[in-house]
Image (tube, rainbow, N blue to C red):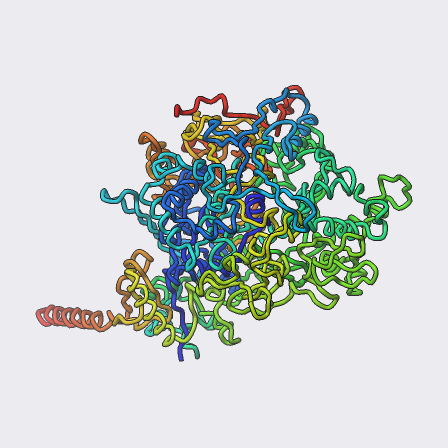
Amino acid sequence: MPGLGTSFGRGGATTFVQDLKNSDCILIEGSNFAECHPVAFRFVMQAKERGAKIIHVDPRFTRTSALADTYVPIRSGTDIVFLGAIINWVLRNERYFKEYVQHYTNASSILTEEFRDTEDLEGLFSGFNESARSGGGGSAQSHEGASQSRGEAAPGGGYDTQSWQFEEEEVPRFDGTGTASVVRRDPSLQHERCVFQVLRRHFARYDAQMVQDVCGTPRALFEEVCEALASNSGRERTAAIAYAVGWTQHTVGVQYIRTAAILQLLLGNVGRPGGGIMALRGHANIQGATDIPTLYDLLPGYLPMPAIQRDEQDLASYLKSNAKPTGWWANLPKYMVSLLKAFYGDAATKENGYCFDYLPQLTGDHSMIPTQVAMKDGEVKGYFVIGQNPAASGLNAELGRAAMERLEWMVNLDSYETDTASFWRREGADPAKIPTECFFIPAATVLEKDGTLTNTNRLLQFHEKAVEPAGASRSDLSFIYQLGLRLKECYKTSTDPKDRPILDMTWAYAHEDERERSRGEPSALAVMQEINGYRVSSGEQVSGFTELQEDGSTACGGWIYSGVCPDKQTHRARNREADDYTSPDWGFSWPANRRMLYNRASADPAGKPWSEAKKYVWWDERGQEWTGYDVPDFPLTKAPDTPAKPGATGMDAHSGSDPFIMQLDGRGAIFVSSTLKDGPLPTHYEPLNSLVPNALYKQQHNPVMCEWKRRDNPYNGVANEDYPYILTTYRLTEHSGIMTKYVPWLAELQPALFAEIDPELAVARNLKNGDWVTIRTAVGEIEARALVSGRIQPLRLAKGRWVHQIGLPYNYAPLGLAHGDSSGDLVPLVMDPNVSIHEAKTLTCNIRAGRRNKRKRSHVDEDVPAAQRSQEGAPTAHGRDFPGPQR
Amino acid sequence: MSTGFFTDTTLCIGCKACEVACKQWNELPSDGFEFTGESYDNTTELSATTWRHVSFSEKVERKPELPYPQTRWLMSSDVCKHCTHAGCLEACPTGAIIRNEFGNVYIQPDVCNGCGYCVPACPFGVVDLMQMVGGKDGDPKYNTNVLRADRMEHTAVQAIGGIAGKCTLCYDRQRSDLEPACSKACPTESIQFGDLDELRERARKRVEQLQGRQVQARLYGVDENWSVGTLGAFFLLTDAPAEYDLPERPVLPSTHQPAAYASAAVAATALFLIGSLIFTRS
């Protein structure tokens, strides 16, 4: 979640759902909170009962809208205009929280003269390198292109971030030895190049009229939202923003979240009770799956994976390019060395760089979509699919299924037969012609295994096995453990140096219970104890990440979870003592059992609560330490009046009033000077498939999004009359993935795929409620039942143009009691440049009455000749050629 | 002391957790997989095998004076009302339907013979008969292809087969000091379980609170002088009962009895008189 990570320092929700009940206003946007998180929604309802105003901004009127005080319709894909206009409104009307902005954000930091804004360059920032559009070639080269676009300095194209840096000035070093450079600031926020003024100019044209013209949101509603947020922020009151994948699944998704972050910083709502940004995670353990990641480019605890393009061939160069000079990330070497000690045990020594060179080096983007394309082009031999169903929920799903036909083998672990496991017998496929060898491994369900889930609050909760797994089912942990043991066995006589990583890997997870051990079962507890970390010499657990060392004396499998098992007897994720607020003795939330991040900001610069009503963490003068209702997110005894030490490293470089400890300057980032590939400030770009030209800039799309222009992945294009309607996808309360569709009690509640259609469109296209309709994009077509409802409203854009939006759940696929076509068959492959996420929340389509044609082999299934594979993923300036509006 | 439900529809988010929890606890089969096109409601009504049902009511107002349409979507979890004067209980000829120690209306599965008299006797249309078909071994089986065969052997449904079915107010759970499955599962406390006197007091306060916020709230099944008496499962509504598929004024069928007997007596007298006239003349 780099939207939150770059703005505040950590890639997680800034608060916990229970705290929403203290909010005075909750803006839910990009999330169908009540339907997708019904249990967490109780805290929204509690806030509402306390008198908070609940606002829901969404393309569809959903069950969340029904419970909100105000429903605000919006054209999908235009949230940056909506939020940007709120920012503009807040600035123009002087409704921001001045002290907070001055002291806790980088609004006062001054940019260099080289910086040019999107207002100056027709929708581009300075530093854009268009020459990135190099020629085509095989996809191996293409991956190189992708990797370059993701490099820090982007040597192959995209943005050079040099002109986005802050101006520095020389001041005397803290120890009197010469000078040190620090960022120049203007605390009065008046300097014309300070972030505050740059922000003002950046969003100056985002106003209520623009919102009406671009988003289709009635002006009165927009102004109601502005007033509600502003009047419920400040010393005495706080407002929260909640979002989910409705914001992330866009080619500008990270910047949606950035816009919200800027707004919350201006309103002074971060790190305070009832405030913050609640990133709602869609599945039980998605937070856990990024903390101890299943992502290709991260190691546990958000340590970057070594990458060739950053020239990280050895430990020293890796630490040099990733450890930050100032702020908490100065500690990165301790975490990395301890991680390597956990991975490779005694084999990891100071002399061999703690086996750093055992780690794979990234050569490019190996995320889901590029891998799927490479698989389609025959470059991937084997595929493990665990707890996922890409043949149903994937993008350009038929391309994904065709890709599986080109594998040598595929291993699928699941509790039910999935559409992925049975891709070879899908409609239109000829099993006799598919050579892929498929293995289906029955997996234990959550009740049949021990383990930990990390929820949306960053809260770890341990659960014990309730029943033995059915039949031959095994837990995922057990499968991976056995796989590791058997790989070690395969290589045990090898003397080849390249096999050392497998042979040296620590793998001592045998179960403590004799009976389980005899069946070859691993211990989830042993895994968690290793993640917590221990002293190498004694084997004693460390009590937290502050004890980790850079000298190889400690081992730790995931520093952010450190403290969860502080000794051999304790597993804090088992704790179940609740109170009516922060509940510190219920589970364990990272980091250091902190429930609310950046909570130093709940006190003013002098360390006193901003108000009695919003008291949370404060400086205790008598005890000379930080205290409050939560674990303070600040060095415990660092007084609020501690000055920053110019030239010092780590936390000493921050003052006692810099609450965002992970950041270089200790402040919330309104302006992000590096890291993000598509700009330091959020800018509205139209989605890849859009009905209209960009009303704000000549630049139509995100200039650095990654596209695949291939004949098996055609795009609808902009304002293409063949695709006159907007399509948005979403999830239903009643279903999640494959498992719910086999449960009759859930399947009967929503038995079939349907499309939500507004009555006017239904009349225009002769679509009858309950009847079949067929929806088509350039990628493919699917059929669904029509659900005609006045809840879906056409929207009026600029010049009185009406647009219709169609809603489509993405839960369905051919298998299961509740079944239907998969919406993934309509979504083309395209990626945001920061996190490789696709764009399924806003598409264009066409619709007609009746059922679709029977599936047969199409262009999507055929091989793409090597010469025609475009340089996928390479930064393109798509949309530059499109005639934009005259300004 | 009587127990019951207070369903506050202003808190319902339509998640249907109550429906699922009810079916899971009571091991009821699904009712099939038909897409209805009726808002988000695909189970459509309470039945012998659906004892909690969430209704959805959509209304869109477009007025010229409004700059945008006003949409409202009411959701409400319906259930057996456990009437003070229950039509089903009165109509039951076998004594299968009783009022149990918690004051709830309960169908004893081992006594019910499936005569179905209770079905039209319920003014809310709650009670229904389970549809049965012959099983392979001659035992009756449910007309459903979804309940897994291995579960069939053990289900409570099996035990009460061939008979009328409706909410038991989780009699088995109450006897073990557990609250009913639906209220336990409700994430927003829209369904509240407890002592009816307490619930009614809480509900009245809630109405006051909502009215203070200009919400048109009213209770359904508390203070009306209905022939069914007060309801053991009552509701807080913000619109007309019909919007929630509830009758405006439920009537106990037996209240028609005096009138029916009277008209029968009149008819009998008339027939007797006409008959006597004919026979005396001949």
Q: Residue at x 86, y 48 (%)?
A: A489
- Nearest the camera: A608 or A267? A608
Q: Quadrant of the C terminus of chain A?
A: top left
Left or right side of B266 for B40: right
- Nearest the camera: A607 or B86? A607
Q: Is residue A844 something one can see in this rendering?
A: yes
Left or right side of A296 for A210: left
- Nearest the camera: A129 or B136? A129
Instruction: State the residue lying farthest toward the left.
Output: B281
Residue B248 figure quarter: bottom left
Left or right side of A183 for A320: right
Q: Is residue A430 something one can see in this rendering?
A: no
Give the number of marks: 0
Left or right side of A861 for A199: left
Is A203 above or below relative to B59?
above
Q: Position of residue A166 (x, y in %)?
A: 57, 38
Q: Position of residue B71 (x, y in %)?
A: 33, 48
Q: Quadrant of the N terminus of chain A?
A: top right
